[in-house]
Image (tube, rainbow, N blue to C red):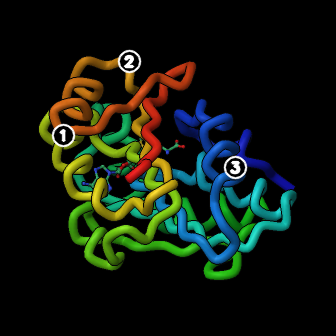
Amino acid sequence: MKTWKDIQGWFDFAEVYDLCLDNAKDGGVMVEVGTWMGKSAAYMCEQKRLKNRNVEFVCVDKFGGTQDDEGMNRTVENLGGEFFHQFEKNMKDCGFVYPDDYEVIIADSKTASLSFDDGTLDMVMIDAMHDYASVYADAITWKRKVKVGGYMCFHDFERDSVSKAVAEAGINAKMYLPRTGVWKRTA
Ligand SMILES: C[S@@+](CC[C@H](N)C(=O)[O-])C[C@H]1O[C@@H](n2cnc3c(N)ncnc32)[C@H](O)[C@@H]1O
């Protein structure tokens, strides 16, 4: 059986997912915007199972289209323009299946956000495009979806484009090492 460690990706925020999962209430909903091949998603599914947590985990990704860098674009091209099937296979190889372990929304971030009422999410992890305009749009779009007591997190927070966009969206996130900004909604 494979594990999340065998999946290609950039996941280095296990401690942040632990924090958010431990903070979420049973019956809660956690959303990851930017799933790629499923590395971070498989980690969350593993932890949900190990901790026997009844929390819905939703993966949001376009699973195709233009990516953050040329290497990613080449990978998508080699897979025929979409990578949902590779993601699904990776998850299955790790023992996780839809919809028991995770939910999926195949859509752009803004469209996917329409699936959730304001103030309902225990976690939103933003790990999609990392340019200023994209992060700002994601921050504004998803901020209102987070419930009081829930977390909003931003990967690659060490990049100016990310931390500046988050601050200018009115979110007072703090760096949670090594590379993720974390904000807890308190009111
Ligand atoms: C850096 S990767 C995510 C890495 C992943 N979390 C991991 O553990 O390796 C970014 C992902 O965000 C997706 N993405 C980028 N912009 C998006 C958007 N506007 N809406 C939905 N998904 C988007 C890309 O398709 C890509 O799969």
Q: Which residue is found at the position 78% from the left and 49% from the top? A: 3
- Residue 158's tag is 2
Closer mark to the observer between disc 1 and disc 3? 1
Label 1: element kind:
loop
Tell me the crowding category of disc 2: few under 14, some 14 to 19, or many 20 or more residues within 10 angstroms, Cα based.
Answer: some
Q: Earlier in the sequence, mark 2 or mark 1?
A: 2
Whether the residue carrying mark 3 lies under 8 Å from ligand 1 is answered with yes
Judge by depth and name the residue closer to the eye, 155 or 168: 168
Label 2: element kind:
loop
- Quadrant (top left/top right/bottom left/bottom right) for the N terminus: bottom right
Instruction: Indicate the amino acid at tag 3.
Output: Tyr
Number of marks: 3
Decide: is 136 above or below 168.
below
Q: Which residue is found at the position 33% from the left and 50% from the top? A: 77
Q: Farthest residue toward the front?
A: 187
Q: Which residue is mark 3?
A: 43
Closer mark to the observer between disc 2 and disc 1? 1
Measured in 3D between alpha carbons, the distance from the residue under mark 2 to the one under mark 3, in whole angstroms, is 22 Å
Q: Which residue is mark 1?
A: 169
Instruction: Indicate the amino acid at tag 1.
Output: Ala
State left or right for residue 130 relative to residue 1.
left
Judge by depth and name the residue closer to the eye, 63 or 179: 179
Measured in 3D between alpha carbons, the distance from the residue under mark 1 to the one under mark 3, in whole angstroms, is 29 Å
Question: Is residue 32 among the parts visible in the rendering?
Answer: yes
Q: Which residue is found at the position 71% from the left and 60% from the top? A: 45
Q: Quadrant of residue 98?
A: bottom right
Label 3: element kind:
helix
Instruction: Indicate the amino acid at tag 2.
Output: Glu
Q: Earlier in the sequence, mark 2 or mark 3?
A: 3
